[in-house]
């Protein structure tokens, strides 16, 4: 191999190594800034890593909002109709924050509750995160199945051995 080709090969290898190192640093930095959305059921199941910043999505349980007199601290419960999870927020809540509306609270778990540094309320009546909507639909289906008597829909053959139809 002549010296010119050897030099070009080394330059190409250095450029590829620099690109790989740069790409790895970008991916590493982006992964550290990701906040995942979890439902109260996920948190109760332990799917949230310790000391991780995450988003908790659900509906504000009716009758759960409690304001601390003389401060901006508000405590409320977020539910997906399966599990409830307490949230504490110290700040000004969005105008659309109400009991029974969808919210997303971002923060970390401390002392068995989410200490939120940001609370987002739904922006219209159709908004709800997909994960939260799925969890609520599953809870409603479970409640409906639990309330209705169990009906066995499997056809059975009559005792005479004829057709079940």
Image (tube, helix red, strand yellow):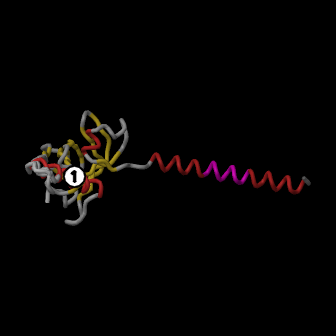
- Give the extent of the magenta segment: 14-22
Report the predominant secondary structure element of the magenta stretch.
helix
Q: Viewer-proximal residue, 130 or 22?
A: 130
Q: Viewer-proximal residue, 96 or 21?
A: 21
Q: Residue furthest right?
A: 2
Q: Which residue lies furthest to the top in this view?
A: 111
Kindly state the secondary structure of the residue where label 1 is placed.
helix
Residue tagged by mark 1?
A: 138
Q: Quadrant of the C terminus?
A: bottom left
Could you tell me which residue is drawn at 23 percent across and 61 percent down?
A: 122
Left or right of residue 41, residue 99 in this image: left
Could you tell me which residue is drawn at 86 percent across and 56 percent down?
A: 5
Could you tell me which residue is drawn at 75 percent across and 51 percent down?
A: 13
- Expressed as whole percent of the image width and height from the top left, the position of residue 88 reads 22, 43
- Expressed as whole percent of the image width and height from the top left, the position of residue 8 reads 82, 56
Mark 1 neighbour density, 10 Å: few (under 14) some (14–19) many (20 or more): some
Q: Does the magenta stretch include residue 85?
A: no
- Expressed as whole percent of the image width and height from the top left, the position of residue 111 reads 25, 33
Left or right of residue 8, residue 146 in this image: left
């Amino acid at each position: 191999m002549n010296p010119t080709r050897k030099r070009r090969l080394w330059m190409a290898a250095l450029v590829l190594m620099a690109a790989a190192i740069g790409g790895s640093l970008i991916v590493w930095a982006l992964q550290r800034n990701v906040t995942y959305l979890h439902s109260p059921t996920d948190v109760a199941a332990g799917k949230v890593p310790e000391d991780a910043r995450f988003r908790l999505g659900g509906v504000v349980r009716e009758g759960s909002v409690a304001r601390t007199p003389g401060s901006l601290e508000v405590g409320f419960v977020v539910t997906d109709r399966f599990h409830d999870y307490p949230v504490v927020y110290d700040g000004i809540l969005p105008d659309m924050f109400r009991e029974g509306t969808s919210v997303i609270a971002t923060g970390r778990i401390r002392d068995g509750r989410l200490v939120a540094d940001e609370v987002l309320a739904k922006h219209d009546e159709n908004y709800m995160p997909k994960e939260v909507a799925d969890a609520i639909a599953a809870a409603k289906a479970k409640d409906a199945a639990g309330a209705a008597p169990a009906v066995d829909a499997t056809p059975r053959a009559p005792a005479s051995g004829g057709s079940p139809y």
